[in-house]
Amino acid sequence: MKEKILWWSVLLGLACLVAFTVLGVVSLTETVFWNPETFAFILGLFGFWLFANRLIFGYSGIIEVAKAIIDKREEEVEKEKICQKAGVSAENVNEYSLRALVFMWKSYLEPFKFSFFLAFFLILALNLLFELNIITFVSVAPIVKAFFLGSAIPALFVWSLEFMATYYVLEVMKGKENK
């Protein structure tokens, strides 16, 4: 539920920002949003945050569940919710161990992670083309750079949470071998 609320609030905020800018409702000549680089930074930040929302909440949830398994608090975890998050039918919830569900949840997020980082890589590549003067368009280059810098913030969150989730999933799998 928190994930959907955050996603919709960021989407509505971004839509209002774009609408106010396009319609000129706010006197933008007096505000910082008149600066196209600032607008591109905010657009990159919020746009990629919307794109990364599922990954950020997914990896955070995986870390939380994996910590519960490691700390032997497995009774606190609702397997039905994890089945839903992992894209697995909840009908056979008793057939899966909690460790397997966490691993399936992480695997379920892989296509989203790859598409997110593909989009980020394309923005990075475009930015590098402008930075290395392979493409020269003086008025667009700073806007692309600002958009890239805005998109780098959610990408850093996704990247770090993915590493943490991988670590905890490996700890959960390692814990099973020791039993």
Image (tube, rainbow, N blue to C red):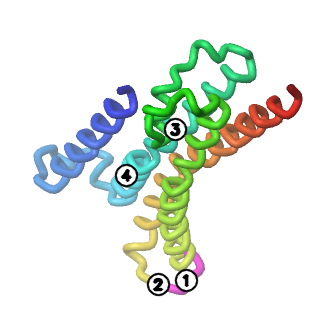
Instruction: Check whether the beta carbons of the residues at disc 1 and disc 4 lie within 8 A of each other.
Output: no
Eye-nearest disc, 3 or 4: 3
Point 32% across, 47% down: residue: 32
Q: Which badge, 3 or 4, is on the more N-terminal residue?
A: 4
Judged from the image, the secondary structure of the residue bearing numbered disc 4 is: helix
Label 3 – label 4 distance at C-alpha: 18 Å
- The label shown at residue 47 is 4
Label 4 – label 2 distance at C-alpha: 25 Å
Label 3 – label 1 distance at C-alpha: 38 Å
Provide the residue span drawn in magenta: 131-135
Q: Is 169 on the left-hand or right-hand side of 137?
A: right
Q: Quadrant of the N terminus?
A: top left
Label 2 – label 3 distance at C-alpha: 39 Å
Question: Label 2 belongs to which residue?
Answer: 136
Question: Label 1 belongs to which residue?
Answer: 133
Q: Which badge, 4 or 2, is on the more N-terminal residue?
A: 4
Q: Amino acid at mark 1?
A: Asn
Point 75% across, 32% down: residue: 172
Instruction: Check whether the beta carbons of the residues at disc 1 and disc 2 lie within 8 A of each other.
Output: yes
Q: Amino acid at mark 3?
A: Gly
Quadrant of the rendered structure where residue 157 is? top right
- The label shown at residue 58 is 3
Comparing 141 with 32, the one in front is: 141
Q: Quadrant of the C terminus?
A: top right
Judged from the image, the secondary structure of the residue bearing numbered disc 3 is: helix
Q: Which badge, 3 or 1, is on the more N-terminal residue?
A: 3
Eye-nearest disc, 4 or 2: 4
Image position, residue 14 (x, y; %): 28, 45
Q: Is 11 on the left-hand or right-hand side of 45?
A: left
How crowded pointer 3 is (Cα within 10 Å; few <14, some 14-19, many 20+) is rated as many
Residue 101 at least partly seen: yes
Image position, residue 22 (x, y; %): 16, 56
